[in-house]
Image: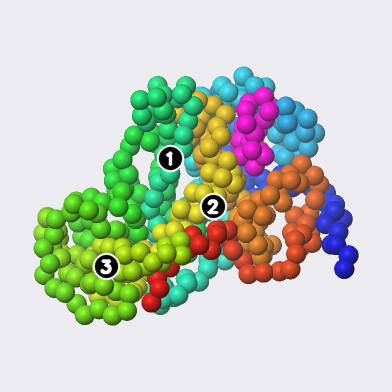
Amino acid sequence: MPRKNINSTAGKLSVLRQLCNHIPAFLLGKLVREHKSESHAREFSHWSHVVTLLVSKICHSFGLNDLCDQLDIHSGTLATIRGATPPRRNTLSHANKVRPAAIGEALFWGTLTHLRNQSKGFGRRKFPGRLRKLNRTIELLDSTVMDLVANCISWAKHRRRKAAAKCHLRLNFESLLPSCAVIDTAAEADAKRARDLTASLKAGEIVIFDRGYIDLSHFAELSAREVIWVSRWKEGMLADVFESRAVKGKILADEIIGLSDSQMVRRIRAMVVVDGVEREMVFLTNQLEWSAEMIVELYGCRWEIELFFKQLKQTLRLCDFIGNSANAIRWQVWMALLAHLLVRYQAWLHQWPHSFTRIFGLLRSTLWEKRDISTLVERYGTAKGSYRNLAAPAQAYFAFSG
């Protein structure tokens, strides 16, 4: 059987231009004026800066020279993207250092809002398993550490001879898109940032986090706001057992307990399957009525945020940075999130049936070519399959076995 010809997909626009066209044209200029950053433009515009950083993340640039040389080679194609221009090495380094990273942050959230308003179904999916019964918002909380070069120790000291930054993130489980993010040094503890990440949660919504976010006063605040939280039991916590409920199957214990600050919560001990091996785990929640199986399955959702971080750090190479200042790191993290969003939107727009990594590789390899993305995606690959936004090995799936 002859192989499909995926090269006969010539178009009028480059793949990079088609990606950038989804960023609202008016938004960046508005943000530049709001942050009074016009004086930083001169020959190298803010738009050229944004496109440059997007290319650095999509093409896995490993240095300023590599990135600037590539943009200079493709300067003709670059000019068709709203007049973007290639930077000089020192110009780009200076822009990363002095232009407010808050512009990149606002550009990401503004683009996300624009795409959702433009395409109402973007980022919507059905919950798996028992969770289909829930008509509630589920949010996942976690952070990831990004190792930096030793030159960053002055502002991002993590250990004696290491520097690192940390991205604290709240991920919506339905859309698998960020709801809130904070970029800070790795020295900042997760529990200290938890209040910032959960400040906008409403009554009835669900938030799931691991043991790093254990904070009894924060638990009390969430419960007072009627926000449902699910976490893991942390060794060394003190509690009194007030009620033991009947259990069956893989649920070993279901108890109502009082924590050291007199909060009444629920502790569930269950056998779960992790990496193909059955393990005993203990969960903690302020939801006293739902079945124990539902609570265990809710915590299993948390694996999705781990996969999200895996995409950012491995697929988009978030571990490689071109710049040492705090402002430069923040710019690049926000542009990595923006690049991820634009690729995700293409996958949804063209009903891509395979993994995120695969469509990212396809767009990356044709970034400077004039190819129509819709035709390219349609002709590319083998047999159609079910859409999996986050590719992950089967043995990494955390599931309740019951």
Sooner in the amino-acid sequence: mark 3 or mark 2: 2
Residue depicted at x 31% and y 48%: 212
Dot 1: element: strand
For the point 23% across and 50% down, the residue is 215
* Viewer-nearest of discs 3 and 1: 3
Residues packed near mark 3 inside 10 Å, few (<14), some (14 to 19) or many (20 plus): many
**Mark number, residue 112:** 2
Residue receiving disc 1: 145
Camera-nearest label, 1 or 2? 1
- Residue 133 pos. (x, y %): 40, 77
Span colored in magenta: 47-68
Position of the N terminus, as image quadrant, is: bottom right
**In the displayed structure, would residue 182 be above or below residue 260?**
above
- Say above or below: 209 vs 252: above
Q: Is residue 50 magenta?
A: yes
Q: Which label's residue is closer to the chain start, 1 or 2?
A: 2
Q: Secondary structure at mark 2?
A: helix
**Quarter of the image where one finds residue 117:** bottom right
Q: Which mark is residue 269?
A: 3
Q: Is residue 325 magenta?
A: no
Examine the rendering and report whether any part of residue 225 can be seen: no
- In the rendered view, tell whether residue 252 sits above or below residue 45: below
Amino acid type, residue under disc 3 in the picture: Arg
Label 1, residues with CA under 10 Å away: few <14, some 14-19, many ≥20: some
- What's the amino acid at mark 1? Val
